[in-house]
């Protein structure tokens, strides 16, 4: 059936669009005076770990002067997922070019899986194509394609997981559950943010089945298989961390984040000082600065130091719940509504120091930051308004879909909403929030695509549900 001149094969044009946009962006950073080395703050650590794995087959820290561990000691902050992804680039002699090429391919596949997932959920070609197009032109997806960072790989793994998990729910075939489980566990090894997501989804799955009186032995067995596939390798890595470094957790990045971001933001508010300046004094970028504040910890093990950081951070947050609640909530709003265009301006050297805007945002709030960008960087303000309006429209149509009478709250829809809410909540706080939207942007776009289709149908008054059959 032809609907609004949209045919199913148009997805390949959208994938081609995604490919062209990213290649043009890559070319532009070479042709124009861009501030680019394809590396961010975390890139150096990932690359060092990848080289250790490639050369010596061991996962150890080899960097001097970082807070993340002494040189030649077992790495317990980073996980091996993304460093393993970098190894083909090392073997082929051009880490940046090979990795960027692979990430561009993953972006195109993310667009395709977004389309296929939307089609499974709503059987609506127009909604599916719209969802895919929104992912294809997403500024954060485009931006992080060319960086040696884990965002693109993680976003791809999440949409693959959701696609095969929804396929399993609809078919109840175990092979799809196994593929979904493997995708999820790999994503956890790429970015540990998904550590607790496994249990949330399993619980949501069981509760839904019980409430709908569809819980049976097969559901129980399959849930156990899902949990085991994820828990066994994750637990094995925790055992490795404890045996090699006496650290009982999966990744110490959580301790680093809560200490240098969450606790630092609370202290900055209480002390009426700069958030980023306080981070520097606390030693986020140089272990020697950290030891100036805590000289007694020079003889401590990494596990002992991370345990101290976690305990201190939790005490700071616990003693200042209202201050932290506001900081966390504002961070959640930035995940959803900050288009992140300042990254492009820093990249092309229109804005001299991105940190100053993050600093101003955390220290003075979003309204004051908008004002200073408006007056000091009018071109940046214009692009922020345009990109912000697009993002706001996406969120509005996503919300429209949720209140539409045509939305049926099936198990897949509920689980997708759980994933979105989980990642938004975990990503709250004072950190670089727009990039944390990347893994949930395909899911938000799926809801937005359906919302736009539903809205247009109501506006025209025609029963063109744009179904694929």
Image (cartoon, rainbow, N blue to C red):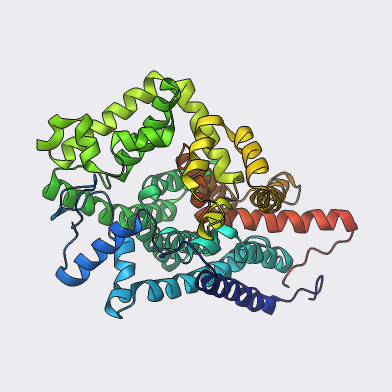
Residue 179 appears in which quarter of the rendering? bottom left
State the residue at coordinates (71%, 57%): 450
State the residue at coordinates (27%, 47%): 250
Q: Nearer the viewer, residue 216 or 186?
A: 186
Total marks drawn? 0
Report whether 53 appears left or right of 394.
left
State the residue at coordinates (63%, 63%): 118
Seen in the picture, residue 226 relative to 317 is either above or below; the reply is below
x and y percentages locating residue 59 in the rendered image: 19, 60
Query: Considering the image in quadrants, where does the N terminus appear?
Result: bottom right
- In the rendered image, the residue lying farthest to the left is 299
x and y percentages locating residue 144 in the rendered image: 48, 61
Report whether 138 appears left or right of 248.
right
x and y percentages locating residue 13 in the rendered image: 66, 78
Report whether 229 appears left or right of 398.
left
Query: Considering the image in quadrants, where does the C terminus appear?
Result: bottom right
Seen in the picture, residue 113 relative to 418 is either above or below; the reply is below
Report whether 99 appears left or right of 308.
right
Q: Nearer the viewer, residue 165 or 84?
A: 84
Viewer can see residue 148: yes
x and y percentages locating residue 289 in the rendered image: 24, 37
Viewer can see residue 207: no
Seen in the picture, residue 239 relative to 297 is either above or below; the reply is below
Q: Nearer the viewer, residue 207 or 99?
A: 99
- In the rendered image, the residue lying farthest to the top is 319
């Amino acid at each position: 059936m032809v609907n609004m001149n949209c045919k199913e094969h148009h997805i390949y044009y959208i994938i081609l669009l995604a490919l062209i946009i990213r290649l043009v962006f890559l070319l532009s950073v070479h042709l124009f005076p861009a501030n680019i080395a394809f590396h961010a703050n975390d890139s150096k650590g990932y690359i060092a770990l990848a080289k250790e794995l490639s050369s010596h087959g061991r996962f150890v820290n080899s960097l001097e002067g970082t807070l993340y561990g002494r040189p030649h000691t077992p790495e317990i902050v980073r996980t091996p997922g993304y460093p393993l992804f970098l190894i083909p680039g090392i073997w082929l002699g051009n880490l940046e070019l090979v990795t960027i090429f692979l990430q561009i391919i993953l972006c195109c596949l993310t667009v395709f899986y977004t389309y296929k997932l939307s089609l499974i959920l709503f059987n609506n070609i127009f909604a599916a194509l719209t969802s895919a197009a929104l992912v294809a032109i997403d500024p954060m997806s485009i931006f992080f394609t060319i960086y040696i960072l884990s965002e693109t790989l993680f976003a791809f793994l999440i949409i693959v997981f959701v696609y095969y998990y929804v396929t399993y729910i609809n078919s109840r075939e175990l092979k799809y559950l196994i593929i979904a489980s493997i995708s999820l566990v790999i994503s956890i090894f790429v970015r540990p943010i998904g550590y607790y997501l496994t249990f949330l989804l399993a619980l949501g799955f069981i509760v839904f089945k019980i409430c709908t009186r569809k819980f049976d032995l097969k559901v129980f067995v399959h849930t156990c298989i899902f949990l085991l596939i994820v828990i066994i390798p994750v637990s094995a890595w925790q055992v490795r961390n404890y045996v090699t470094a006496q650290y009982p957790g999966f990744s110490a990045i959580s301790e680093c984040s809560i200490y240098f971001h969450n606790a630092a933001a609370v202290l900055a508010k209480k002390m009426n000082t700069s958030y980023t300046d306080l981070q520097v004094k606390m030693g986020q970028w140089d272990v020697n600065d950290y030891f100036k504040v805590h000289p007694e910890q020079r003889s401590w093990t990494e596990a002992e130091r991370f345990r101290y950081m976690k305990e201190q951070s939790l005490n700071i947050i616990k003693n200042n719940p209202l201050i932290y609640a506001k900081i966390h909530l504002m961070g959640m709003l930035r995940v959803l509504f900050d288009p992140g265009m300042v990254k492009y301006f820093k990249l092309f050297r229109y804005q001299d120091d991105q940190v100053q805007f993050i600093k101003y945002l955390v220290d003075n709030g979003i309204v004051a930051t908008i004002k200073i960008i408006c007056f000091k960087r009018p071109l940046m303000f214009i692009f922020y308004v345009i990109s912000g309006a697009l993002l706001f429209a996406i969120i509005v149509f996503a919300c429209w879909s949720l209140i539409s009478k045509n939305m049926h709250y099936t198990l897949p829809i509920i689980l997708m909403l759980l994933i979105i809410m989980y990642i938004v909540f975990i990503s709250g706080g004072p950190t670089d929030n727009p990039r944390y939207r990347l893994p949930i942007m395909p899911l938000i776009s799926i809801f937005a695509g359906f919302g736009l289709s539903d809205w247009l149908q109501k506006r025209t008054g025609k029963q063109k549900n744009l179904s694929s059959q």
